């Protein structure tokens, strides 16, 4: 006996496909160029570099586009150079880094707290 074929359910994430525009880019450079040239967003690299601003005193831009790197390698130098601002989460200790999920949570929490 063959089971009746059911239509796929429109779950909450699929409903938003009609509302949220998704754009695919062939590489990171194309994405960064698109953000810089065709939007009002300010590219903010989240990385530990010599030009990083500490998060505790960081003044978030009005429309930030945060760029997070790979958990092992971080962001490449070319990516950081293409970002207008660089922020780092100041940390002390033996292993002063967070995984990308933790880092993004800290950054977004700080952004929301400072921009009420």
Image: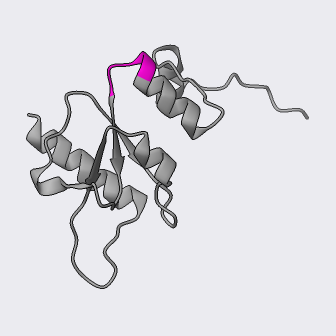
On screen, residue 38 versus residue 50, left or right, reads right
- Residue 48: where, in percent of width, then height? 33, 62
- Residue 47: where, in percent of width, then height? 35, 57
Residue drawn at point x = 19 percent, y = 42 percent: 111
Q: Main secondary structure of the magenta part?
A: loop
Residue drawn at point x = 41 percent, y = 58 percent: 100
Whether 66 is drawn above or below 40: the answer is below
Residue drawn at point x = 47 percent, y = 21 percent: 16
Work out whether residue 11 can be spotted: no
Work out whether residue 7 can be spotted: yes
On screen, residue 91 versus residue 95, left or right, reads left
- Residue 56: where, in percent of width, then height? 12, 56
- Image quarter of the N terminus: top right
Q: Is residue 11 magenta?
A: no
Count the marks: how many?
Answer: 0
- Quarter of the image for residue 65 reads top left
Asked whether 33 or 19 is in front, the reply is: 33
Residue farthest to the right, as pictured? 1
* Magenta residue span: 37-41
- Residue 44: where, in percent of width, then height? 32, 41
Whether 19 is drawn above or below 93: the answer is above
Residue drawn at point x = 46 percent, y = 19 percent: 20
């Amino acid at each position: 006996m063959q089971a009746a074929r059911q239509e796929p359910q429109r779950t909450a994430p699929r409903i938003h496909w009609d509302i949220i525009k998704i754009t695919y880019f062939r590489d990171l450079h194309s994405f960064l160029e698109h953000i810089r040239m065709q939007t009002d967003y300010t590219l903010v690299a989240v990385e530990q570099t010599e030009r990083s601003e500490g998060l505790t005193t960081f003044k978030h831009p009005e429309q930030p586009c945060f760029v997070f790197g790979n958990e092992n390698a971080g962001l490449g130098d070319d990516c950081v150079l293409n970002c207008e601002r660089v922020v780092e989460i100041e940390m002390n200790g033996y292993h002063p880094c967070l995984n990308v999920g933790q880092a993004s949570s800290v950054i977004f929490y700080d952004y929301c707290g400072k921009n009420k």
